[in-house]
Amino acid sequence: MIRIFYKFSFRISAVLLLLAVIVSGYAQSAAVDDVRNRAIRVGVMLPLHDDNGDGRRMVEYYRGVLMACDSLKKLGVSTDVFAWNLSEDGDVSKLLDDPNAAKLDLLIGPLYSKQVHAMSKFVEKHDIRMVIPFSIDAPDVHKNRNIFQVYQNPNDQNESTIRRFCEWFKDYHPIIVDCSDSLSTKALFTSQLRRALDQRGISYNITSLKASSDEDFRRAFDSNKKNIVVLNSQRSPQLLSAFGRLSDVASNNPDVHIAMFGYTDWLMYAAYQLDNFYRYNVYIPTTFYTNVLSAATERLQLKYRWNFHQDMMQSLPRFALTGFDHAYFFLRGLHKYGKSFDGIPGSLDITPVQTPLKFERIGNGGMMNKAFMFIHYMPDHKIESVNY
């Protein structure tokens, strides 16, 4: 019995030792494969060609990704970058069949909504984090926890903007100005804003750029409260006309405090309407802002020109800066937290060059960027960013 016991004990010890070796080997293998301990494998699947505007914009975006990878080397973050040209009519399945695709840690793309679902299934199968950089029609974000969607759809964006408008300007007197603009895309926004103001019991006035007299236009303003003017058009001619009407009010009624609430489109007009933006206290809601005078922006513009022998496109937003911000954010996050990185506010101490990223989980699905700000042009000729 004693001999059998020792023989049995030896067998158990050998088995336990073998299990320990296996577990140790697995742990060492897992540690080596931890994205925090090796080069991060990032893939880009976008239209990377020179055939049309989409391709040229995405090439610039991709160059921004490469500049982010280069900048992160100084922080000890290594990357292996893979890129595929996924055109609008491209076959997603062919690209996903590439053995390198299944090994990715981060996949950026696609540009076109119709390609999202196939890529969503792929990243879920292989546990890859997927960043949808531009598409807003991506139902998969509601069920795939691996997806990060950067842009919201227009309805969600309107709701977010209106909610913050009502919070920030709760002590103002809103004035909604009808611009009689058949090409406007903002009629829905102003109608939703009026509904929200009614629900909150906030009184407001409605007037028109075609008011019959200056006095009729002036009567919409409150001398005892700050006034916030909202046009139902985003277009430049209507904005110029509004500045003309506001000039009459301001000149003849110095006691009337005027501010304006605009649209992201107005950022395109800032270069040649800057004095009016300052004068009328313009607030612009946006999810991005390019401060062309900042040191960070100037540095990246110079780096882009040096590396690619051309300047960035004069677009809104700047696509190279967008690619830089996206890649820098996610690569820093993966390097710090591994695959548990979720991009929630406060997880990274990063100042974006152009595009803030603050993600929230959508139910049991993926993450949606909720970053939002007002760009405020102040009368003392300063510009502030009010972040939410």
Image (cartoon, helix red, strand yellow):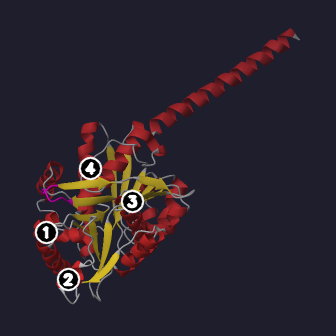
- Gap between marks 3 and 1 measured at Cα: 25 Å
Q: Earlier in the sequence, mark 3 or mark 1?
A: 3
Q: Which residues are magenta?
A: 377-382
Report the front residue among 215 and 91.
215
Mark linked to residue 68? 4
Q: Determine whether label 1 and label 2 are within 8 Å by CB.
A: no
**Which residue lies under the disc numbered 2?**
215
Label 1 near label 4: C-beta < 8 Å? no
Which residue is denoted by mark 1 in the rendering? Answer: 276
The answer to whether the residues at label 3 and label 4 have Cβ atoms under 8 Å apart is: no
Callout 3, which amino acid? Glu
Which mark sits nearer the N-terminus, 4 or 1? 4
Distance between mark 3 and mark 2 Cα atoms:
30 Å
Quadrant hosting residue 23: top right
**Mark 4 packing: few (<14 Cα in 10 Å), some, or many (20+)?**
many
The amino acid marked with disc number 1 is Asn
Mark 1 against mark 2, which lies toward the viewer? 2
Query: Does 384 sit left or right of 92 as displayed?
Result: left
Please report the residue visible at 48 percent of the width from the left and 70 percent of the height from the top. 199
* Residue at mark 3 to residue at mark 4: CA–CA distance: 36 Å
Can residue 260 be seen here? Answer: yes
Amino acid type at mark 4:
Ala
Q: Which residue is mark 3?
A: 167
- First along the sequence among labels 3 and 4: 4
Q: Secondary structure at mark 4?
A: helix
- Which mark is nearer the camera, 2 or 4? 2
Q: Counting residues from the N terminus, which is met first, the one under dot 1 or under dot 2? A: 2
Amino acid bearing label 2: Glu
> Helix, strand, or loop for circle 1?
helix
Q: CA distance from mark 1 to mark 2?
A: 22 Å
